[in-house]
Amino acid sequence: MTWTKRLLSALFALGVAVGIVLAWLLLFYKSPPVNPAWALAGSKDIPAGAVTVRFSGTSTLLFSDGETRWMVDGWFSRPGPLQVLFGTVAPDLAAIERGLAANQVSSLAAVIPMHSHYDHAMDAPEVARRTGAVLMGSESTANIGRGWGLPESQIRVLTDRAPFQLGKFVITPIVSRHFEFPDPELRERALGDPEITAPLVPPVSVFDYKLGQAYVLHVSHPKGTWLIVGSAGYREGALEGFPADTVFLGVGGLGSQTGDYRESFWRETVGRVAPRRLIPIHYDSLTAPAEGPLRGPLNAEAFLAGGLENTRLFLEQKQADNPDLRFNTLPRFDEVVLFR
């Protein structure tokens, strides 16, 4: 074999190897870090006046008591990994239309992003526009709404610990912290310089969707109380005095942190409010299709905030340590009775 042929053969082999690695990173998903035994099915019987929840993936949740409906995040777009890493993103109008239809919702009282990153707040202004909802969140979230052309009459900036009412729902936003990425460079890009100070007009980089304020939402209703923790971050003592029957616990990236961090996070969320039921959220892929079964992160995503096996083992250990605490996961889109 000539030198030229050997070089071409080596380059071909290298190209094949690179292609295999890229395919493994960008096309294959890991299993979700939750126990399949925790899965709930949609409720067949929904009594009048029951409080229900629908889950769309990540931390998008739709709550209803038959009179008032409101949504957390309202994120249905799923830009792909190459677009997220190297391109720009914008709301996918067709995906939003499909997501609202799958949730069987055409009107909402409010849509409340848990913070202003793209996977929480990017679609929320369009959801508000289509449903007549008020977009509620930080000043950064308000600037995402303004950049989308949402009128000020549909924008409301929340105040820490100032409760507000939607029908029979009383919601208290509590300023918290975002999950602390272990990687310093990623942490700085995602959490440093956190404010969006002017109307944000997409398409833009995902990192232009800055953090704003990270909230925990405490919700009370005549039927029951619950807490929504959209990100695996915490502030010590912030949830003291906010008991809840159920906690929706964001666990994205939790396994990539230290054991001490995980224990502190549990103590300052679940431990503070003493629930009877725990429902993990924000454990699925940010790039998988918004329809179909929930998938764990892409292999590429897992490099950024991985530790999936640590997350699963941690949750299973907490279940073993707390036998009176019921663990559940929600189906995608199907209505589930939260409180009868």
Image (tube, rainbow, N blue to C red):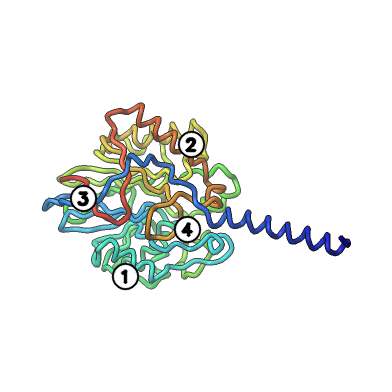
* Mark pair 2, 3: CA separation: 31 Å
In this image, 170 relative to 111: left or right? left
In this image, 15 relative to 321: left or right? right
Residue 138 screen position, x and y as percent: 38, 56
107 shown above or below 212 = below
At 35% from the left edge and 68% from the top edge, which residue is drawn? Answer: 126
Which tag, 1 or 2, sits closer to the chain's start?
A: 1
Disc 3 designates what residue? 43
Q: Are marks 1 and 3 in contact (CB under 8 Å)?
A: no
Which tag, 3 or 4, sits closer to the chain's start?
A: 3
The number of numbered discs placed on residues in the rendered structure image is 4
Disc 2 designates what residue? 310
Q: Do the residues labelled 1 and 4 touch (CB within 8 Å)?
A: no
User: 74 and 324: which one is in front?
Assistant: 324
Which tag, 2 or 4, sits closer to the chain's start?
A: 4
* Tag 2 secondary structure: helix
* Mark pair 3, 4: CA separation: 28 Å
Disc 4 packing (10 Å; few <14; some 14–19; many ≥20)? many
Disc 4 designates what residue? 287
Marks 2 and 3: which is nearer the front? 3
At 51% from the left edge and 50% from the top edge, which residue is drawn? Answer: 191
Residue type marked 1: Arg
Residue type marked 2: Asn
Residue 135 screen position, x and y as percent: 32, 62
* Tag 3 secondary structure: loop
Which tag, 1 or 4, sits closer to the chain's start?
A: 1
Disc 1 designates what residue? 129
